[in-house]
Image (cartoon, rainbow, N blue to C red):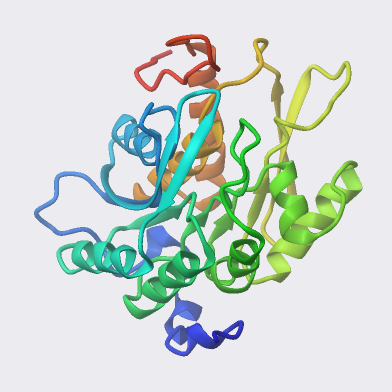
Amino acid sequence: MDQPGAIFRRSARFDMIVAPHESPFLASPNSKHPVALTIAGSDPGGGAGIQADLKTFAALGVYGYSVITDVIAQNSFRVVGTCPVAAASVTEQIESLVAECVPRALKTGALGNAAIVKAVARAIVKLAMPPPVVDPVIIASSGTRLLESAGERAIRDFLIPLACIVTPNIAEAEAITAIRVDTDAAIREAARRIVAMGARAVVIKGGHRKSGADARATDLFYDGRRFIELTTNRIPGGGAHGTGCAFSAAITAHLARGKSLEDAVRGAKRYVIRLLKHRFKLGKGRAILDHFARD
């Protein structure tokens, strides 16, 4: 059975890699655009998951690679069922892409189960890929659990130690750290704990935080040295399906284009805000982000 840290025997070279955009393993010189990779689940409605990630990459001028981990039957308001892909198939998908071109940056989303989480972590180390943007998708916005407790532990033990940044919402931060995250002090403590697990940085998203009459939403960025509060006015209307996917994908795209980690987070926040302002509905469910929106 895998032990925490056991899959990192070949990870010493990660100590020399500061951030994905500084990786010496760049896209092919024949490529017109930088390449980014998303390793995540599929959303047939296109509002979240792989589909939303690829739309985000394209909108930000990045060529998108994708590896499917979980086939999820869902729409904007309900998850009907999930079918995780075999971990060996996930590994084969990653290896086939890297054999042609190592992406400049990558992100992970819904990973389905613990075996897939470990397979992804092994591949990142074995293939000397850039440290990932880890979006720890545990529960869908509709409330359906997308990852069992063993998968949560695997993210904590095997994937977060590789991450350049982790992007949990409040509920995911609570699951990862096993503490109640309901105050400003608790959010900072959760951020410290996640960075202590090995991640270079974390941004805890505050959009789902119960705020009472507060008309502002604050995301907290922490890189082990300083806290930065990214505060914006809340956009009326109850949010939208797939905001977390778009946010982490936008961070990944900006890293692939050479932005610093802080600038990538700021740019991703601006991108999601723009999409939220132009969101729309396809049916009776939640709103969908408009990836075609321009200011």
Q: Nearer the viewer, residue 259 or 249?
A: 249
- Looking at the figure, which quarter contains the C terminus? top left
Q: Is residue 49 above or below residue 287?
A: below
x and y, in percent, of residue 160 in the image: 59, 66
x and y, in percent, of residue 78 in the image: 54, 27
Q: Nearer the viewer, residue 86 or 92?
A: 86
Q: Is residue 188 left or right of residue 256?
A: right
At 34% across and 18% down in the image, what residue appears?
292
Q: Is residue 263 left or right of residue 129?
A: right
The quarter of the displayed image where residue 265 is located? top right
- Looking at the figure, which quarter contains the N terminus? bottom right
x and y, in percent, of residue 269 in the image: 56, 32
Q: Is residue 262 above or below residue 206?
A: below
At 32% across and 70% down in the image, what residue appears?
88
Q: Is residue 269 left or right of residue 61?
A: right
Q: Is residue 249 above or below residue 7?
A: above
Q: Is residue 35 above or below residue 198?
A: above
Residue 267 visible in the snapshot: no
Q: Nearer the viewer, residue 64 or 13?
A: 64
Could you tell me how many numbered marks the image carries?
0
The quarter of the displayed image where residue 71 is located? top left
At 38% across and 44% down in the image, what residue appears?
253
Question: Which residue, as the protein is rendered here, is positioned at the far left?
Answer: 30
x and y, in percent, of residue 228 in the image: 72, 45
Residue 257 visible in the snapshot: yes
At 77% across and 64% down in the image, what residue appears?
193
